């Protein structure tokens, strides 16, 4: 599925990961590679340019969060922007009535089988109602689905009024089953007759979801179609079918997303199981190689600034616990620094020997040492006498000098925090910081 787009994006990011440093030239090349990959998947040119412009601005303009290398930072930006491009995650709750709409051959009936299977696996009981009175053998097709899935079907051959079939279906199944799924007739295009027919059906069925099926091979032409159906009959979501059979699916997804019609499902084959609930983050992660991204995203999360710790520090509390929080995730101390740096007039120089964000090995050891302390020792490290130092060294697999060095650094850091919290009449820099972040603090 979308192999070419995926390999194009992966290749672009791999180049970045290999490059020595990030400058305008590397970013330009990255952006060009991404453009090429997206255009080959039929993503709209304007959308591609808007996206790459944003990537470029952010990659060159934003400072990486502490603990993240400039390269990782750029990869994260590309990931974020791609997720944004394909849309928001739509909720699939537990609809009672679903109406499928779409043009001839777009995959309505096949997708109805998939959706029925999807909800059945969740332990719900679906029933199918065949209201496609135009296509020959449409009734037979949906009855076969019912047989395969062991799901009841109302699809009479001798009734030519779709509304009457829908009404009868409601009568038969609405009380007895969890989810009613209605098929409908397609046309070659969304003409007035089809619009009228679907509107009336909508009024009779009163569906919780109206799902438009669009074949992925339409590429960006999916956009106008989604818009047309949206305006004329109202839809709650799109199912992009046949994603397995074309390289243009990227264009179909992004074009729908831009019209505001959320893509909710993706069809990836003819079998009942070939259906995915569309999740932009998962979709992009997989597209650009999940393995590589996973660790990067976890890291990004880890170094997010922790308001809780900052709040305690701002109020003057600085035990070994706060010190530890700063160390955790390598760069916590750095993140506090970057917050301070970002406030005008509050730029603060972190003493060199306290800035440990680059010394991963040392920080790991310190973590082990602090983990070997008792709660009382963490609350008041001045109680750590030499026999305790010995015990902590043993427990953490370090030596006593290292434990002493940790305590020394803790004291130094604490002193600095004190200076900061008591620096002005209004309570010092950190108190000001706390006021600035009053929402989060
Ligand atoms: P309808 O006219 O909208 O009801 O469309 P159908 O459900 O009858 O599907 C038309 C054709 O598309 C059939 O041959 C299906 O097997 C095929 N089809 C539907 N969904 C998919 C899909 O996700 N992948 C592939 N490869 N084929 C699909
Ligand atoms: Mg059909």
Image (cartoon, helix red, strand yellow):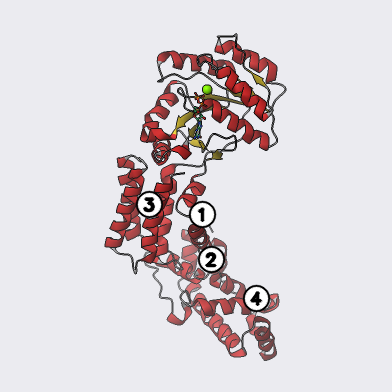
295, above or below 134, in the image: below
Q: Residue furthest left?
A: 25
Disc 3 packing (10 Å; few <14; some 14–19; many ≥20): many
Residue found at x 67% / y 25%: 147
- Residue 130 visible within the image: no
| Left/right of residue 42 with respect to residue 270 in the rendered view | left
Numbered circle sitting on residue 371:
4
Sequence-wise, the earlier of marks 1 and 4 is 4
Sequence-wise, the earlier of marks 2 and 4 is 2
In the rendered image, the quadrant that contains the C terminus is bottom right
Name the secondary structure under disc 1.
loop
* Residue named by callout 2: 310
Disc 2 packing (10 Å; few <14; some 14–19; many ≥20): many
Q: Nearer the viewer, mark 3 or mark 2?
A: 3
Numbered circle sitting on residue 439:
1
Sequence-wise, the earlier of marks 3 and 4 is 3
How many numbered marks, from 0 up? Answer: 4
Q: Nearer the viewer, mark 3 or mark 1?
A: 3
Name the secondary structure under disc 4.
helix
Residue found at x 40% / y 17%: 191
Residue found at x 41% / y 34%: 217
Q: Say whether marks 1 and 2 touch (CB < 8 Å).
A: no
Q: CA distance from mark 2 to mark 4?
A: 20 Å
């Amino acid at each position: 599925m979308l192999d070419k787009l995926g390999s194009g994006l992966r290749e672009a990011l791999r180049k970045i990961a290999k490059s020595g440093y990030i400058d305008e030239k590397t970013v330009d090349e990255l952006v060009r590679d991404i453009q090429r990959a997206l255009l080959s998947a039929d993503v709209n040119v304007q959308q591609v340019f808007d996206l790459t412009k944003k990537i470029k601005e952010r990659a060159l303009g934003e400072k990486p969060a502490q603990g993240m290398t400039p390269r990782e930072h750029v990869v994260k930006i590309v990931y974020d922007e791609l997720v944004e491009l394909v849309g928001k995650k739509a909720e699939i709750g537990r609809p009672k009535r679903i109406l499928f709409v779409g043009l001839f051959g777009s995959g309505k009936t096949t997708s109805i089988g998939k959706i029925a299977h999807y909800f059945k696996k969740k332990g719900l009981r679906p029933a199918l109602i065949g209201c496609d009175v135009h296509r020959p053998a449409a009734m037979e097709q949906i009855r076969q689905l019912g047989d395969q899935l062991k799901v009841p079907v109302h699809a009479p051959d001798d009734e030519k009024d779709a509304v009457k079939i829908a009404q009868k279906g409601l009568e038969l199944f609405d009380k007895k089953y969890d989810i009613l799924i209605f098929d409908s007739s397609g046309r070659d295009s969304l003409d007035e007759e089809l619009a009228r027919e679907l509107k009336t059906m909508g009024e009779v069925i009163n569906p919780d979801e109206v799902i438009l099926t669009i074949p992925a091979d339409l590429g960006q032409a999916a956009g106008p179609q989604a818009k047309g159906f949206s305006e004329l009959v109202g839809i709650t979501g799109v199912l992009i079918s046949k994603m397995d059979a074309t390289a243009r699916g990227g264009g179909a997804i992004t074009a729908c997303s831009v019209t505001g019609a959320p893509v909710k499902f993706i069809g990836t084959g003819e079998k009942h199981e070939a259906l995915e609930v569309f999740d932009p983050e998962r979709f992009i992660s997989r597209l650009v190689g999940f393995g590589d991204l996973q660790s990067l995203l976890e890291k990004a999360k880890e170094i997010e600034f922790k308001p809780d710790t900052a709040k305690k520090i701002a109020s003057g509390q600085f035990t070994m616990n706060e010190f530890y929080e700063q160390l955790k995730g390598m760069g916590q101390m750095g993140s506090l620094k970057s917050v301070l740096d970002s406030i005008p007039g509050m730029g603060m120089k972190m003493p060199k020997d306290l800035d440990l964000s680059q010394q991963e090995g040392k920080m790991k050891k310190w973590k082990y040492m602090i983990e070997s302390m008792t709660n009382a020792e963490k609350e008041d490290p001045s109680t750590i006498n030499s026999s305790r130092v010995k015990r902590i060294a043993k427990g953490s697999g370090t030596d006593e000098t290292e434990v002493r060095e940790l305590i020394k650094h803790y004291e130094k850091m604490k002193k600095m925090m004190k200076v900061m919290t008591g620096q002005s009449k209004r309570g010092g820099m950190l108190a000001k910081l706390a006021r600035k972040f009053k929402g989060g603090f």
